[in-house]
Image (tube, coloured by chain):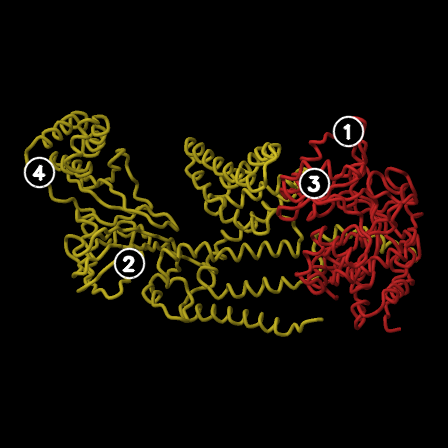
Amino acid sequence: MGLLSHIPFLKNFAELSQLGIMGMNRRNYSYIGRYNPRSLFPLVDDKLKTKKLALEHGVTVPELIGVISSQHDVASIHDIVQDHPAFCIKPAKGSGGKGIMVVAGKNDEGKYIKSNQQVIEREDVQRHTSNILAGLFSLGGATDVAVLETRIVVEEALTKFSYEGVPDIRVIVFRGIPVMAMMRLSCAASNGKANLHQGAVGVGLSISEGKAVNAVQNDHPVRYHPDTGQDLFELALPSWDRLLHLACACSDMSGLGYLGVDLVIDQNRGPMLLELNARPGLSIQLANNQGLLPRLQSVERLKSPQRMSIDDRIAYAQKYFHVAPGAASILGDSFTVDPEA
Amino acid sequence: MKLSRQPFYLFIAILVIGGVSLSLYRHYAFNVPWLPGEKRLVWSIEAKIEFQARSEPVKVSFAIPDTQPGFMRMAEHTASAGYGLAYLEDPEGRRAQWSIRNAEGPQTLYYRVDMMVDNSQWKTSGFSEAPALESMDDEGPYVTAAKALLDEALERSADAYTLTHELIQEFNTQTQREQYLLQDTSRIVWLVKLLQEAKVPAREVLALNLEDGRRRQHLVSYLQVFAADGSYKLFNPSTGQLRKRDRLLLWEYNSQPLLDLLGGTRSRVMFSMIEQELPINETQELEAFQESSLLDLSIHSLPLEEQTLFKGILLIPVGVLVVVFLRIFIGLRTSGTFMPVLIAMAFIQTKLMVGLVGFISILAIGLMIRSYLSKLNLLLVARISAVIITVIILIAILSVIAYQLGLTEGLKITFFPMIILSWTIERMSILWEEEGAQEVFKQSGGSLFVALIAYMLMTNELVRHLTFNFLGLQLVLMALVLMMGSYTGYRISELRRFKPLQDHASQTSGNN
């Protein structure tokens, strides 16, 4: 480093690099650009395609009620959801949780009640659907279709961690191996959305046990959920192995080398796939208080991890990416990088 | 999985070496200096003569300018495939004469002259000499009517200049008589005749208003009136206003026709011009400058009309480089990747203040109107089309207001990229609905900041000099962009983002 390290920001760059933190340029160039073939992007950018693919591969997804693909059919939405009092409307090509409307039920007058107890007219539901079709929420404003799904019932053990909205689990799967995970908890500040840049709480999870290692909100460490007051470090996910299995299976079916898998746990149906992301964000590093690069590089040194069985891959991750629960220390001795050992 | 990087670096090396050596070649072989240095302003003006030949011998005689007060003629050349060319110099002025035995169909002839701005230059060829007086010998109803106008103007004037002014006023107020006189011949011809009749030497001159980078311009008629002491002034024949001599090149001043065409029809003449700042030694070797060879990768070998275009286009890579740098190294967010470059290009045309005010007001008003459109629940394509029309109406209104206020710079607001602006408004509006106003200000502020930096670089004297004179540097710019495209380090903005991680790391290591 020598003289150069005295220039303020170069010194900081060197520190970040030492911590193994991945920057945007590195993610785009060395991982997305190298491991994610462009031709596979439509599979994950279109929720309907992802859903079909998942069903073919036997991956559990929220139940599909129906699809509305033309403005002409918008009025028929009320018939389609007749038998499903609790449902949600999503844009197939939406990103970042935009344009998702969750309906919890109907009141006596036949009006809809949203998940936050707000009563809305039938016309409001129609207009929202129409906006989805016009492409208001899709990438680049392309025309879209509206996907109707049953509403997810939050697993009881997790309800106290979330305020309005469904907490989801993001797992980064690299070359078939889960490398880092976090839980995203919606809160009042994020308007029920589970996206970190919108103010949701991110809880880093240990890959080995699915327990909290650290928590952040708006990039800053927190200990308690801002709305429910729940101690976030008590978070321990039930059926963690099944979640990891699901994430690996999703990675295999998508064919993408660097993938963000968003999972939820339904009270009735257990872990299921919510959506896939070919450009997963970098905030997961903040939630885990840990850089992604050492883990990614250790997987890169493996010859062909895709040929390993899912169990072997999970065992690899649990062995080498182990972090003690609750311990947000990131330079600890718990971290080993020696895949050949 | 990893591709070998060697071909990539080799390619970059070739680009850099190629670019640098082309530039070196231009520097040493053509004496183009690296720095702008001390310079003379040279106007290159190109006349493009177009006509339809009728399959018979063609003779084209075209008036061409000479050294005159304010300008020294440096060099001239023509491009005209198959035509014989002669420069004629006689007391009646300089003319270029093209001839060909047989020509058919559309014909294009080019004449280009380089005029150096030189205020010490007073050697002229008949330009400041008054023409001989001629009196109107023909009698008739027109002459009688015209003389009536002259008599009234004579009453209210004291000398040659006031007479000219009054005479033009007379034409402007007595519209009926003017209409009648125009049936015979044009106003300026009448003005000249009447002034001559009043023993005031006068003539019509054809002049070109000089403005950098203009294309498809036409000559403008002015009335040159001489006073008794031999001085003269130029009048605008329709308003009577005086025209100062700055940025005005007199093209024809011997009462000769601009173009004399035998064997062709439907002729028209258009002018393009470009302002160049050439080092003094270079202006002296201007002739050598114009011999083009393949290795002389210089846009100076192109026709002027294209040169004026390239003067702007060659700056775009500089702006693009700024965008790439700020996005990859700094991590600045802008709305629309290259929108800032287009905005910067528009700023160059409009001048900064007018551009900034125009841009911000169009964006602000556009966003307001767009927020109303979003309530109408329109389909996307229709909504964006409505925004485009809104933007065009806004630009039209702003232009009118600016013109009424006397801000002629405001007229150039039409240089704004309208479709891009509309998309920006659309995207900003969605952003506003989804992420709130803060993000909108962040992104539009970012775009404006990038545009300003690009603008400052693109108007920089040295940058303009280098890009315009050394085409090889484009290859170097290309190499820079490619290299930045493979930068995988951190962005400056990520320092702040990942600061909590860093802080934590230093805490724990401090505890140990």
Q: Earlier in the sequence, mark 3 or mark 2?
A: 2
The residue closer to the viewer here, B381 or B436, is: B381
Query: Which image quadrant for residue A43?
Result: bottom right
- Residue A161: horizontal and vertical position, in percent? 89, 43
Alpha carbon separation for disc pair 1 and 4: 99 Å
Q: Amino acid at mark 1?
A: Gly
Mark number, residue B110? 2
The chain coloured yellow carries which letter?
A: B
Query: Mark 2: few, some, or many residues within 10 Å (few <14, many ≥20)?
Result: some
Chain to which the residue tagged by mark 3 belongs: B
- Left or right, residue B247 beside residue A91: left
Alpha carbon separation for disc pair 4 and 3: 79 Å
SS category of the residue bearing label 2: strand
Say which residue label 1 marks.
A110
Say which residue label 4 marks.
B135
- Left or right, residue B309 beside residue A153: left
Q: Earlier in the sequence, mark 4 or mark 3?
A: 4
Marks 1 and 2: which is nearer the front? 1
- Residue B480: horizontal and vertical position, in percent? 58, 63
- Residue A273: horizontal and vertical position, in percent? 80, 52
Q: Amino acid at mark 2?
A: Tyr
Q: Colour of chain A?
A: red
Please tell me whether residue B148 is drawn above or below residue B7 in the rendered image: above
